[in-house]
Image: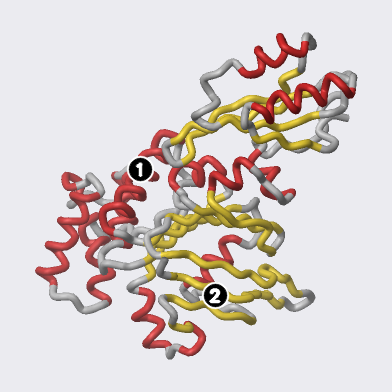
Amino acid sequence: METMIQIKDVTKTFVGKDNSVEALKGINLEVHKGEIYGIIGMSGAGKSTLVRCLNFLERPTSGTVLIEGKDLSEMKDSELRKMRTQVAMIFQHFNLLMQRTVIDNICFPMEITKKPKYEAYERAKELLEIVGLSEKAKAYPAQLSGGQKQRVAIARALANNPKILLCDEATSALDPTTTKAILALLKEINQKYGITIVIITHEMSVVQEICSHVAIIDEGTLAETGTVEEVFQRPRSRAAKKLVIQGDTTPKMEMKGRRCIRIVFSSNSSYEPVIANMVLTCKTPVNILLADTRDIGGVAHGQMILQLPEDRETAEKMVQYLKNRKLEVEELDNYVG
């Protein structure tokens, strides 16, 4: 698979008057052509710094960023400007020009690249149709909703036919319904035009909705990478577990039986009343501390956290029962306390 973005041992340190902050610490990542790649982390983890290093809006303190095999650190300023036409970016707060109409906002990046006015206008009309806003061509940003503004920002980002689209918290300012619509639009653009998309977010639901692969950033380090399905089913790092298990790893109120397990259901196992059958077979109840279902790449995946009985033999029998039914079973430490 062709590599579009390669990040090699990237660090970024911000030096202030009295102190320095190491925002990124030895990040190594690869994003392949045509992927929708999620980079997720809590606030202050370093993910927005990382995405700005991908197009050298921030220069890494050390390490290498390659776009289609070309080292950005070796490029002259003019070459970097040309590269950025192929690595477009959309932002949380849209960054539209308020004194320009919608269609003029979309034409703006083509003005910078000196595209003839007529061609730019025709391209802008085509992009407005793609994002479903043809009737808003003459409107101003102040007359649009948040979702419509983000659609204009997406159209503007696509103006110069980029190969890569970077989305920095692009849905954070939107309500859940609008977020879903914007994510569906990004997925459609990815599938129709083959544009590689990198999504920066702090929301696991965004990653699960459209991403194929994910990297988890924690305090400037790369905590974990893998397919979204792998990370959901078998989160290894503390940061991944915190994001996957609804962001809640604080100990629960003490109840009898301290042993807790997390089980993951795929579409194959979600139709069987497996917990009810396990309780009937083992003749002992369990506590369900958490249960939810998520859509990952169009496939339903569920998870449950169970508190098992104190009796060790019964608990082991339950774990074995679940494993025999091909379910992922993970032991959780200190989930109750």
Question: Which quarter of the rendered picture does the N terminus lie within?
Answer: bottom left
Q: Is residue 149 visible?
A: no
- Give me the residue at 89% from left, 20% from top: 310
| Amino acid on which the number 2 mark rests in the picture | Glu
- Give me the residue at 55% from left, 56% from top: 39
- Give me the residue at 68% from left, 58% from top: 223
For marks 1 and 2, give the CA distance: 29 Å
Q: Helix or strand or loop: what does disc 1 sit on? A: helix
| Amino acid on which the number 1 mark rests in the picture | Ala
Q: Position of residue 5 (x, y in %)?
A: 47, 70
Relative to the observer, which residue lies in front, 116 or 298? Answer: 298
- Give me the residue at 58% from left, 49% from top: 202
Relative to the observer, which residue lies in front, 329 or 194? Answer: 329
Check the image and name the residue furthest to the left: 118
Describe residue 290's horizontal placement relative to residue 207 as left or right. right
**Mark 1 or 2: the one toward you:** 1
Q: Position of residue 250 (x, y in %)?
A: 79, 36
Please count the marks in the image. Answer: 2
- The residue labelled by disc 2 is 58
- The residue labelled by disc 1 is 184
